[in-house]
Image (spheres, helix red, strand yellow):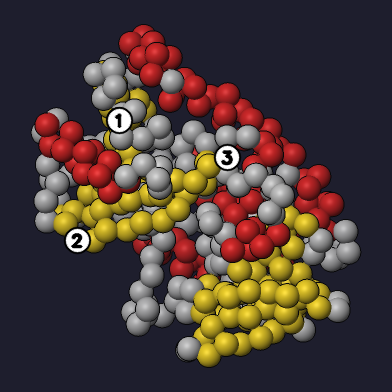
Amino acid sequence: MYDIAIIGSGPAGANLARLIGEKYKVLLIDKRDLENKNPKNHITKPCGGLLAPDAQKMIAKLGLGVPKDVLVDPQLFAVRTIDLTNNRERLYQRFYYNMDREKFDRWLVSILPTSVDKKFNCLYKSFTEISGGYEIKYISNGKEISVNTRVIIGADGAFSKIRRSISKDYLVPDEYISIQEWFQCSDPMPYFTAIFDGEISDFYSWIIPKENYVLLGSALRPKDNPIEKYQILKSKMKKLGIDFHNKVKTEGAFIYRPKKLSQFYTGKDNIALVGEAAGAISPSSAEGISYALKSSFYLAQSFDEGIDGFLDRYNNKVKDIRLNLIMKNLKSPAMYNPFLRNLAMKSGLLSIK
């Protein structure tokens, strides 16, 4: 019998396991192999790999320092904003760290207490309620394994299996699919790029230089011909003189976009959700690492007084996350309403001249 079983070892799951692993008997399950450098089953998390200021602040609050080998060149300090709808362009100063997302996740796993029982390269399947807790089933080396736990934590990101098992009566955040391709590039641009175009998506697209590569990605509606829209994006970039060739790989993943506060859901009974599984992700930028670290930090604090009543304490602690999501949604029209975005960019306010 485990005290707490965590499904997913991204920033939310790994950070929670690190904070509670010495006090409780913790099981950590992830479909990726985050310990072996050359895993047979190589699965990566599609991510632009930018560490935003809010995430930097949370890492500082946790008393951690990111190793230099997690960071990648180039380290840039500007975002080129291209508004294809209004045919307008601006350059804005921003302070992101460019990093290798897989190395970031591996680093968080490397600092876990040895007492945490890590089950990597394992696929979570289901749970059933039993006396005193839950029975979890997962697949390891083709075999189904069953274990018991008092508490389940869903840290399994967008399209969370845990959330879908317990939140049928709760609104799921708007779902997007992120398509991202890597291309070889010997002459990277000196800025990150954000692209807005209503023909492609009501969210946004991005270009990120990363060492000898450049990433082109877009957050697209799953039912709105995402593959076709992504090809339109590439064609429009080519007309701007940004041609993509020598493709290395293609990645894809679901992304949540919480447009209503009711779409942020922390769980029920002895099952809690953290990070994107809870709907804790920026509706304006899709930045999720800061929310993953913050929500897992609050959940860890809620376990300080024991397991009984932890969810009520967690709900009380995440009030500032709810407020932040409200503020981000208030900010979104200035970014995603074409008329308001055009006014903001036309003014040149806060842009680099």
Image coordinates for residue 317, horizontal then vertical, percent = 77, 45
Eye-nearest disc, 3 or 2? 3
Q: Earlier in the sequence, mark 1 or mark 2?
A: 1
In this rendering, does residue 62 appear at all?
Answer: no
Which residue is rendered at x = 27% and y = 41% of the image?
229
Label 1 neighbourhood size at 10 Å, few (<14), some (14-19), many (20+)? few
Task: Determine the CA span between mark 3 and mark 1.
Answer: 22 Å
Q: Earlier in the sequence, mark 3 or mark 1?
A: 1
Residue 199 badge: 1
Q: Is residue 18 above or below residue 255?
A: below
Q: Which residue is mark 3?
A: 258
Which residue is rendered at x = 47% and y = 42% of the image?
286
Q: Earlier in the sequence, mark 3 or mark 2?
A: 2
Pointers 3 and 2 in contact (C-beta within 8 Å): no
Label 2 neighbourhood size at 10 Å, few (<14), some (14-19), many (20+)? few
Left or right of 147: which side holds 223? left
Residue 47 badge: none
Question: What element does badge 2 sit on?
Answer: strand
Q: Amino acid at mark 3?
A: Pro
Front-lying residue, 208 or 247: 247
Image coordinates for residue 66, horizontal then vertical, percent = 47, 57
Image coordinates for residue 16, horizontal then vertical, percent = 65, 63
Q: Which residue is mark 2?
A: 248
